[in-house]
Amino acid sequence: MQHNHKHSPFLPEPHKEQTAGSDRELQFLPAIIHPSIHQSNHKIDCHKKGQRRESCTHSIRSRTSSATMKIIASGTFAAFLVATASAFVVHSPLKSSRLSAGLYDAASDDDTAAAADKKRVVVVGNGMVGQRFMENMLKLDAKDCQLTTFCEEPRAAYNRVKLTSYFETLDASDLSMTSEFDEDGRTVWYDENNVELLIGDKAVAIDPASKTVTGASGKTIPYDVCVMATGSYPFVPPIPGHKRPGVFVYRTIEDLESMLAYAKANNVKAAAVIGGGLLGLEAAKAVKDMGVTSHIIEFAPILMCRQIDQGGHDALVGKIESMGLKVHCNARTESMVGQDGSTDNDSDSPVSALRFSNEGWDDLPVEMVVVSCGIKPRDELARNTEGTIAIGERGGIVVDDHMQTSDPDVFAIGEIALHNNFIYGLIAPGYVMADVAAKHITNKLSAGTVSKEDLDQAAFTGADMSTKLKLLGCDVASFGVNQPAADDEDVQELVWNDPFTGVYRKLIFNKAGTKLRGGILVGDASDYATLHKLSVGYEGELGEDQQPSMLLPPPSVKTSGGAAAEEAISTDPAAQICSCNDVSRGAITDVIHDLGVEGATFAAVKKCSQAGTGCGGCEPQVKQIL
């Protein structure tokens, strides 16, 4: 569907008069001129519902015509308003509607020509990675670019990684990547940064020949460079009955709202989540938070088979089942049974049970099913370009180290990008891709400032797939070589397995015991940063005073009562705290100092430093620094 674009008023309350004459009117400028036509670095509020207003510095790219400044200086305030509107129309998608209202009678040919000279970058997809790309473009001072983004969902970019936390407040603004959503799903960030946001408008076609992207609304946008950031969609196995009422996928806020509404309307008591990976366990938590008994159905012998082993699985299942969830591994789902007993795709009877092909397994009575079996890249637009934009054999848009596709004017980032025949489903690699693409596109269009050194280093050559998560309240982490190949002979493992506390740790060293190669941590991962840095950052070399056995015990055994100990954080300002956003300790400290004693709340520090706004795994470290 297509929404009307509503922009926030750009004439707020004027400041109290402090001077007279033309100076009096000049001092109004930062307060009343629209941010998209005033060039400055100024303070804007970063706030959300129910929180105090916090301030952090944002760089706003814009410009003011000399004619406008002369009118202001002359003291003709009414003329200033017309000139302000004149400058605004050049950069606004609302040009035609405002012209018809008579607001832009003074628009100059020079300004219109200047806008036409701008290079247009169209971002297809307004998810986390697409949003980060645009923020990176603005940081590179790409003032000669007009950014336009197609946003299929009814609201602008939000943190999909923390989707489960939506149930804590049921306020979508708490997940926003920028600021509070208005009634149309927009935030002020887009107007302030002159980014054209096509909310609720799904891109349905890209034409590389004419260099245009067309939305479901019928609107066609020309581009100089197109960035594909469409992400992925949930993979739904062709299980008979998967289209029944009561069967959902777990991907968007609308998915959660639909699940919640269905559960209430149908008095759902039990639900099955098909998939025991990262997304599946998050979905299982969402179901639990609805007050519904959650059954986790996994085809593989263990949960999270890409991150942990059997020992880690046993510890994790113990934690999960102690919370009232049920785990069923090695499950072969045969069909989703309807209330009428049907097991095919022809009936629209609501789901009432899962049926398995496992010998001796009974039907599992459930009134709702959530499918979370993995993802598939949303590459359908590229598939319709008749080979102009190359697609991998199993999906995904093929990219090089600069995130450029087979079409030199089209780039791809995030879960849609196929790099060296691999799709990265984590947010941190997506952010690296966004940074690399922004630098090369800025350089390609000669539209901003990128140093030769930065450009030479801007290459995506793969990503560290190490992760640290808190799933259903349980620490789960893996890093480095956590599951060595069967023919890897340079392996020596040390294992800590405490069934009483539910803590499992496996550290993998070389045969000589001089290098830490990787590990698995379940139940207590509070020393993850130290172990990860030792394994990845220093190529695993242990110091002379470090013995493998000293690294194995969990920090919780070193504290009274067995509570997990807080890991000491490096005092080095360059030490990385947030891997999703590459935020150092020094950057966080600078933000805290800038905000001051009263302003440096945890929420404000996260907002202004971006630390903790990705997966959230570094939040304990940010709190310690604060």
Image (cartoon, rainbow, N blue to C red):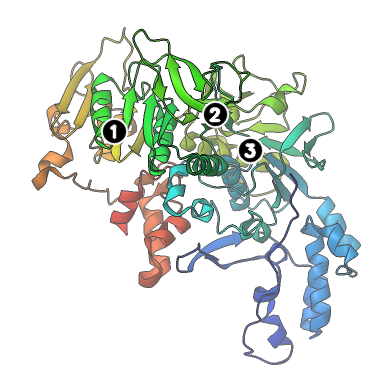
User: Mark 1: which secondary structure?
Assistant: helix
Instruction: Say if mark 1 contacts mark 2, CB within 8 Å.
Output: no
Mark 1–mark 2 Cα distance, whole angstroms, equals 28 Å
> In this rendering, is residue 68 above or below 486?
below
Residue type at the position of mark 1: Ile
Q: Residue 46, image x and y in percent?
A: 52, 63
Residue 21, placed above or below residue 48:
below
Observer able to see residue 280: yes
Residue drawn at x 44%, y 48% as measured from the top left:
167
Compare residues 551 and 424 and report the one nearer the observer: 424
Going 51% across and 37% down the picture, which residue do you hit? Answer: 432
Picture coordinates of residue 618 (x, y %)? 35, 46
Give the residue type that dot 3 points to. Answer: His
> Can you say which quadrant of the picture contains the C terminus?
bottom left
Local SS, label 2: loop
Query: Residue tagged by mark 3?
Result: 440
> In this image, 69 relative to 538: left or right?
right
Residue 28 got which mark?
none
Q: How much space separates mark 3 and mark 1, taking CA atoms? A: 45 Å
Residue of label 2: 350
